[in-house]
Image: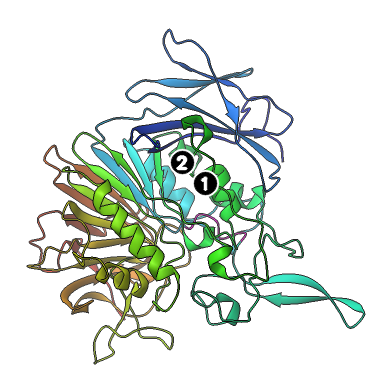
Amino acid sequence: MHASATVASYGSYVILGEAPSGDNIAIARTVIDTNQTCPTVSEVVGGSDISMISRDNPNHFSVLVCEALIEFDKSYQINFASGAVLLPMAKSNPENILVYGDTGCSHCAAGTAAEPFKTLADAGAAKNADLVLHMGDYNYRGTSGKTFFSSYQDGKWQQLEEYTYDAGDGESLGEHCGQVPGQPFLSQSASNSNRPDIWENWQDDLFLPADSLMTSAPWIVARGNHELCSRAGPGYFYFLDHNTRLTGSKQLSCPIPDAGKDAEHNTVQIPNYVVSFEHLDIAVIDSANACDNSSQSPFTKKYKKVFSELESAVGENPAWLMTHRPIYGVEKPGSQAVPCTSKNDFSCINQMMQAALKQLKSKSLPAAVELIFTGHMHRFESVSFPGSKRAPNIVVGSSGVSLSSGAPYGANTTEVDGEKALVLSTSNSLTLNGVQYPSFGYMSVSVAEDGSWQSELLNPEIPEVIVTCNSEQKLGSGVCELGKGISVEH
């Protein structure tokens, strides 16, 4: 598929991040055909042209990603031969923020936009927000199910169907946390794989459905486990990651997979980064490799380093921590799961990150972190700790992917990592005035100058707000409560 002469680009967008100097950066990007030349960027009024350069394309994607640095609080456009495309402004003081997570669609037909993500994205775009936060898991079209690997055995070629490495999110040997000793590292990017990471899946699951959302506001992104290097990691680093040669740094990319080496040598850990706004810092850590139900892996030591470095990265501003996997999440019991309490009513995640935090002198996140935003669990959930200094964890993992059923339902009390927790959770459906709806949603957050905030979980096809939340934490169910008339049933 080619971009039309009138459109010129498959998508133009702005990614926010941090330069090696510690300064905020805003990166204008556009995706074009490989036979085209990178366009220029300029201020909308009276600006000189800035040349865009192409990003390295180590995975041989069939499209070209061009980029240039732009300044905050100024209006820019990308100048194509067919006309200019207006970019969203990177604001130094965002007040209205949208949160999405787990948005891909494994069962949607090839060549179609992921739904219901497109519906949710279009609704968010209409709100004219200042910033979008995406919690990861963008690409399900190209990462669900097994992969065929070719091998030459007993004098003939064979194809073996296997699951690829998934940092513990599965029960096959290849998916296990840290990898089972003696098990080869299986990656979709291996030369004998029939399912490499390709542009068409990124286009269908992200760029088509999120077109209006990407042009409405800049994005800050986290990497999900579906973007591990064994899965759609190459595309994540090409299209979305904020690391760029434009800052004198290097563009990150996945290593060439080596089946004879373990997961630790076949993966990339993205360094922490912080985007500092006037009244709020947003810190991002890469939890794609953090196993939910195990801490018995060399990666636990890596996450101790991640959290240690986070302590010096956040300043005096109120801070939100943004990452894919919940640090504090509650799920139904399972054979591979770790029970929250001896009652075994629920299982608790993320065991690896919780273990890593306990190895710090402080045994906790930095005091400046007042809120944790994550995805990964295919539902909405809030986990609050009344009377504690521990930040609540809000999970927005219901923005398009097939939803999880099972406990917990509605409001519950349990214990999470040694502290009393109030848990509010949707399942795969909710009820309003006797009518049942799939509980998909995205979150709209309003931030005040003092760092306080309030938010709503929304779906344009549900006539009431699904969940309301605020920073006061005086609600009976913790930081969040179900909207008027909303119920979550077994």
State the residue at coordinates (40%, 86%).
Answer: 334
Q: Which residue is mark 1?
A: 209
Residue 325 in view here: no
In the depicted structure, whether residue 22 falls above or below residue 141 = above
- In magenta, the rendered stretch is 137-142
| Quarter occupied by the C terminus | bottom left
* Res. 324 image quadrant: bottom left
Q: Amino acid at mark 2?
A: His
Q: Residue furthest front?
A: 361
State the residue at coordinates (71%, 42%).
Answer: 62
State the residue at coordinates (33%, 39%).
Answer: 131
Tell me residue 269's x, y (percent).
47, 56
Q: Which mark is residue 242?
A: 2
Q: Which mark is residue 113?
A: none
Q: Is residue 201 magenta?
A: no
Judge left or right: residue 156 versus residue 150: right
